[in-house]
Image (tube, rainbow, N blue to C red):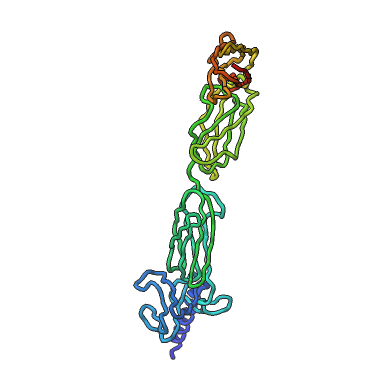
Amino acid sequence: MNKKIMVGIFAMIMLLGVINSVLAVDGFCFVRLGNGQSVPAEIVSSTKHMTCDGTICFVHGLMSDSSFLQVCTDSRGYYASYTSCDKLCTNNGNVNPAVQNLTLSAIFPFADGGVFTKQTFFMDIQTNKIASITMIDNVAGTQRNLCPNCVSYQKPMNFKQGFNDITIRAVKGGEVKEKRISFFIDNLKPRITKTMPLQNKFANGQFIVSYDESNVKNVALNYGISGNVLSQESTTCPGGKAQSCMFDANLSDFDGMGIEYWFTITDVANNAVSSKKVKVLVDNTMPVINIFNYSIKGNYVTFYMNVYDKNMDKIIYYDNDDPKARVLCTGLNKGVCSKKLSFKSGHHILDLQVRDKAGNVVSNVVEFDV
């Protein structure tokens, strides 16, 4: 044989060897399929997967003369060109992956028990065998078929607001693998609907915020003047719609002064919203009853009260046999409230309350018979 031809043949053999060594990477190996076993095709064609049917196996319509089908697959189990493979697939040294145990890999883009502000996530789910993949909503008790016959599911998925608890399940014959995870989604900011006291009104230390928020983490009250702003925080305010939370602040350092206050509500996803700043006048001083007496004549009782309060509002009373509050005086005449009232016969216990515009209250209880 011509020497040049011999060199050419040798070079060709070496080149094929290099090509085969490049193509036969670790991610490819020959799978032997038995009766009824399949592998999916990477490229969609008229035949979407390779199946060994009965004792005769078919590959794209071509018959094999053996009772098993040897197919080249990649690391995911997809059909690959036979030139990519040079070895049988193994599992810890045991040939034939058909006897491998089913595995399930579910890579979630969030942590178990996490809290998130978005609702759509990309799911990456893979198995080592063609299997049925489903997602179970453990909260709603529903089941969704993600893929009836595949080795992977990689798609965006939308989840509901609030608490989510899901299980990813892969089933191959009698083999079942599951991955479970729970998480919380909250992308709605809290909504503050009202704060008390109102603008330019009096404050005695009681502040109220009304809001809509199902997942309250904390509520903070901020109050004071420039250079001296104090805060109180509560983690026990209720969650839900049309809820309210009350704070009792010590305003003794601001008595008689004008201050600003505002609330900040934070939910479990750290969404936060603050109310507008409200200006109020602090009145932390209780009314003073200097003189109190009464006289009875028949069914009539005359009350006399000398009261001091710079922001006086009104004097009311409760009778023991009448739960309704009734007004004794709506104002003072030179510091005096004098009123004659008619009572039915019997024993009476009156709770007389002097209230100022800031809500400070002082009471005096009296008993008499008419």
The residue at 58%/20% (across/down) is 346
Residue 145 appears in which quarter of the rendering?
Answer: bottom left
- Viewport quadrant of the C terminus: top right
Residue 360 location (% of width, % of height):
60, 22
Answer left or right for 260 relative to 49: right
Q: Is residue 285 visible?
A: no
Q: Report the front residue among 74 and 153.
A: 153
Q: Is residue 50 visible?
A: yes
Residue 130 location (% of width, % of height):
46, 71
The residue at 51%/24% (across/down) is 199
Residue 299 appears in which quarter of the rendering?
Answer: top right
Q: Report the front residue among 307 and 155.
A: 307
Q: Is 210 situated above or below 135? A: above
- Viewport quadrant of the N terminus: bottom left
Answer left or right for 271 relative to 38: right
Residue 119 location (% of width, % of height):
47, 50
